[in-house]
Amino acid sequence: MATDNANADGFGEVSRVRGIVFEYLSLGASVFGLVALGVLLVYVSIDAFDLANASPVWLLTYFLTLVVPFLAFCLYSANDPAVTRRALGVLGGGLVAVAAVFTAIETLLVPIPRLNWQLAYLFVVGAPVTAYLTYVGSGERVGAVGFGFLGRLLGGAALGLAVGTLFLVFDSLVWFLAYTLGVVPAVALYAFGSARSVPQAQTAALPAGLLGVVAAVFLRGVVPTYPSDLLIYLWTIAIPVAAAGAFAVAERRGRTAAAVVAGVPLALAAAGGFAAAGAGLPAPTVLLVLVLTGVPTAVYVSRVVDAGEGLVGFALPVLLVGGVVAGALIVEALGVPAPDPWLDPSFLTEAPSQTPTEAGLYPAIVGSVIIIAMVAVLSFALGVGTSVFLEEYTPGSGPLGTLTRIIQVNVANLAAVPSVVYGLLGLGLFANLLGLGIGTAVTAALTLSLLILPITIISAQEAIRSVPDDLRRGSDAMGATRWQTTKNVVLPEAMPGILTGTILALGRAIGETAPLIMIGAATTVFRAPDSLFSRFSAMPMQIYVWAGFPQADFRYGVVAAGVITLLIILVGMNGTAILLRNRAERGN
Amino acid sequence: MSNTTSDDSLITTEVQTESNDESAPPAGAGTAVAARDLNVYYGDEQAIDDVSMEIPEKRVTALIGPSGCGKSTFLRTINRMNDMIEICRVDGEVEFGGKNVYDDDVDPVALRRKIGMVFQKPNPFPKSIRDNVAYGLKIQGFDGDVDARVEESLKGAALWDEVKDQLDSSGLELSGGQQQRLCIARAIAPDPEVILMDEPTSALDPVAASKIEDLIDDLAEEYTVIIVTHNMQQAARISDRTAVFLTGGELVEYDDTAKIFEDPEEQRVEDYITGKFG
């Protein structure tokens, strides 16, 4: 045919140069920020953990006792020869390459401060390979069990500490009354209504609960004696958590298993609490940590044992603890000089000090945790409320529609207002006009909530808008009221998106300093806040002040330790929120 | 013009005997929905032009016509879904259950609880199959045996055998045709009197569509079904009565399906049906 002749030399070529250039430019743009932040993190970690003074033998010891077994665990879980080959290749080849490049740069160009090639290897090769293998390993059954187990242990402990911290500020006696008079009767009524099909009881549950909470606030000063804090936490938190755990297991395994899974951790936690009280430790926190760690872990173990797969994964925590202990023993036996990290337990539990070695972040950590908890609740409630109103309840046209559009535009503008201006607003409105006090936790929480509110609103609006109209019409056609449609269809579908926006906004709030300075937050406080109206400091404030101290130990070591603490808490908080969000997504 | 057709329809409703559905209830069924001098406007544009018609109960009534002829609009005036469109304005009466649904004392939400609706695109909620079917029961505060009603509705929608082992999995995991039957199950679960269907098979493949058509036949034993369709063969196969709308929202002819397709009064209807117009 004619066309055969025309295409005798093939079809010619189409140039892809521009596309390829664009692809690599995009790659560069996306990597640039990450690399810059990575370099900063490397230096901050070196300072915080005093790694510059770590001898190669010390590094090698822990690499062999801790990192290598962990990587082996991940590879065992992944069970993929190709991945193993690749990992070994990168670890081995990386060693040579990093050492060569590092030495070359140091001898030929400039000396690199505070780094040696062993550390460079650790950060450039060790950390990414570990992260990658963790990801690959956790995808398989054994790894999933190991990380799930470890996550519940660590997460439960962190949650217990966070709840304990919150009760430093919130009145546990009011909580006791509110729980006893409000929550318990409401839940009981609702359960009774569900079990016996009495809809009236279900409807009455919410008003009854609210009535109980209001009564609790009034009775707080009237009731003369209260049980000890330990008993209050046991009754209001430990027992319900155990009951929830029992409930989760009972559906699957029956009552005996449920009693064991919930009862054993509860008994252990109670025993631990009373023992701690006897030993003069903070008993309520011990109780909370034990019960919040124990019950989810027990439920998880029971589930995994039922499934009967990947039981080897339970060895992961043992492996890690064993690695640390073995490393410590070897270092001790060889007499290797160990680094003296700034970020140590006493840094997290002590008050600030004029001496770098004694300085601690405890009051600022408590301050930040309390503020963030309040900001999360406030900005979520206000943000979801506003966005639901703007998206679902306002008409698109007419005078009300115009008003809505004006509000929309202004909310978008508010997101661009500098935070220092919000600080001024907080000072004028909350601190002075409403009399909530200068530099108090509640003023700070309200100010920061306002600061991130526009971001929460805009992202929640986007999430709500992305719910298909088909679903709304489907619900409307069933005879649902607007509220029923919003509650049953729109909000559940939009929730992952709303949570994503809120998580990002909270990350910003936890690091804000300018508005806190404006509302007169203390730069340094020596006692953790004990009420919403006491003076507080926050982590970024404290870090900022330390950075201005004349001693080099403050500017490098202590500040670095503070930054790492701030980041760890931020990552922990975001991680929890992301887990919740993913669960909400799966729930759909 | 429309007056004559409505007169026609009044007469033919009374003598409705022809039905290719052997299980249909005896002739002389009452009127489920009646429109009187109905006009609907979107802003300045008229979407329904002075339509009067009576729709018999426990029969399948098909609304056909070219795109933009107002048949979907007419369907949505029955359960007042047009209220959701801000620029929409309705004149005239739609009588349902002995009451003009546009009277001031009619709560559209309460009205919609008596009328089920199935849309063109299957729109199951992102919930489990059970929760999808139980949705109407839940929002209406149904206090009977929900699970029994879910089973009954899924059987009514010919879906039970396919999903009885996976009631807790998401409704979105079903195929398109199953999703549409799930939507039908959802619509019949609160036991409405009328089911409105807006081109329920146009997004489905022919096999799934024919299952829905069989289902519509069965539904007419218990419910009044009003279906908008683009597919004239479908209207001819499944409906007892057919209303032909033409451009401008005009109801041109409304009669027994057999009469419309074999011997229409109006030349324009014949042109449309034979494909010369539309």
Image (cartoon, coloured by chain):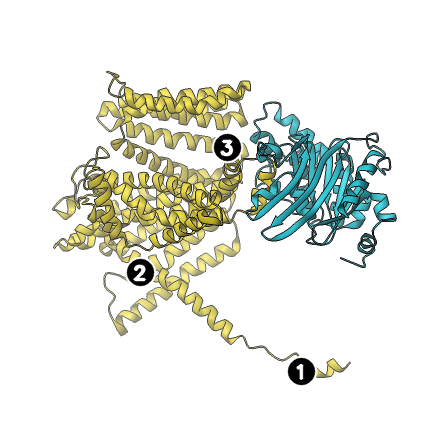
Q: Which amino acid does label 2 sit on?
A: Val
- Disc 2 is placed on an element classified as helix
User: Which sits earlier in the primary sequence, circle 3 or circle 2?
Assistant: 2
Query: Is A100 in front, or is B54?
Result: B54
Q: Which mark is residue A9?
A: 1
The answer to whether the residue labelled 3 contacts the one labelled 1, judged by CB atoms less than 8 Å apart, is: no
Q: Above or below — where is B275 with respect to B36?
A: below
Residue designated by label 3: A303
User: Which sits earlier in the primary sequence, circle 1 or circle 2?
Assistant: 1
The chain ID associated with circle 3 is: A
- One can see residue A340 in this view: no
Q: Above or below — where is A85 with respect to B253?
A: below
Report the side of A420 relative to B49 (left or right): left
User: Which sits earlier in the primary sequence, circle 3 or circle 1?
Assistant: 1
Q: Above or below — where is A366 with respect to A65?
A: above
Q: Which residue is drawn at 25% across and 42% down?
A: A444
